[in-house]
Amino acid sequence: MRINNDVVEAIGNTPLIKLKHASEATGCTILGKAEFMNPGQSVKDRAGKQMILEAEKRGDLKPGGLVVEGTAGNTGIGLAVVASARGYRTMIVIPETQSQEKKDMLRLCGAELVEVPALPFSNPNNYQHIAKRLADELRKSEPNGVLFADQWNNLDNPKAHYVSTGPEIWEQTGGKVDGFICSIGTGGTLAGTGAFLREKKKDIVIGVADPCGAAMYELFKNGVAKATPGGSITEGIGLGRVTPVIANARVDEAYLIPDEEAVPVIYDLLEHEGLCLGGSTGINVAGAVRLARKLGPGHTVVTILCDSGNRYQSKLFNPDFMRSKNLPVPQWLERRSTVKV
Ligand code: PMP
């Protein structure tokens, strides 16, 4: 173990954890990359780090500069962590429907929050469009410059995973990896990690696990980005359109994972494996189980444990909330839960 000069250097190099139940159920080795162990507790620390460090290299950020982004929360936390450590400020535009825990964490990290109504991307007042307009406007008055991180279009986002997540998985498994699968928010994790692993192993199977209501399942299954019916309580995933980040991603398998399949996985990981994780991880691990079944016993499948379950105490781990969404609540959660909203 070496000494990190700052928190930015502590991002990445996360453990790979064998998921017991998923492995036993499939006869495969299913491994989860523990991204919740990053300093900002999610996979998006890597993108935050890469986008800021590359902007510095290009000369787009000066000391005291402002980083602006539209985010479901985790990218904002990653950006805020890196920005604090390197002397920048952050302004984060977030849909008001995102969990209170993520908003609280953003404020604690020093971000200025702009909460806006949750509107579809087609609406000009969708949070991503508001963030871009804000960045353009502030550029006129900010003396030290403004970086609009723009994670859906910024290729430094998938690059983060091409230079770190992919190589780490390759090294940790000693190249014994037959499949990689994850869900898509921007697609940075999928595109960057997938591209690196494919370069190393031509016949690796890359999969996408998509929540209901998103368009990636149809895109990679049938070639057209069309939203599937229904919705999901998961946060940070569920892309509805093709963006530059995923435009060139090569995907072999796509699975549509309903919340009814993903949520019990989250509870099982907490009850039996000591892993308290967020909803997108449930989609990922359920997808890994499907991919493992497709590959057959004896194979190794890697997926992403995206963020910490702490971030969703008031939702995923709140029996009243889950009942209001007609989702199953295990008895033990009723007994252990202290959250009343
Ligand atoms: N899970 C969670 C909880 C997230 O916040 C995100 C990013 N928004 C993802 C998964 C997906 O990451 P990516 O943007 O790399 O597709």
Image: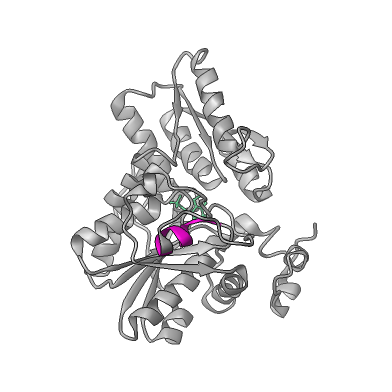
The front one of 308 and 224 is 224
Q: Quadrant of residue 124?
A: top right
216 inside magenta stretch: yes
Q: As drawn, is 222 to the left or to the right of 239?
A: left
Residue 25 position (above or below residue 83):
below
Residue 225 position (above or below residue 140):
below
Q: As drawn, is 138 to the left or to the right of 29?
A: right
**At x 46% / y 86%, what residue is drawn?**
25
77 inside magenta stretch: no
**At x 54% / y 73%, what residue is drawn?**
274
Residue 146 in sight here: yes
Q: As drawn, is 47 to the left or to the right of 273?
A: left
Q: Position of residue 113 (x, y in %)?
A: 62, 34
Q: Quadrant of residue 150?
A: top left
Q: Position of residue 263 (x, y in %)?
A: 61, 70
Q: Position of residue 327 (x, y in %)?
A: 70, 70
Q: Which residues are magenta?
A: 214-221
Residue 277 position (above or below residue 68):
below
**At x 33% / y 66%, what residue is drawn?**
252
Residue 7 position (above or below residue 129):
below
Q: Position of residue 191 (x, y in %)?
A: 35, 53
Q: Quadrant of residue 1?
A: bottom left
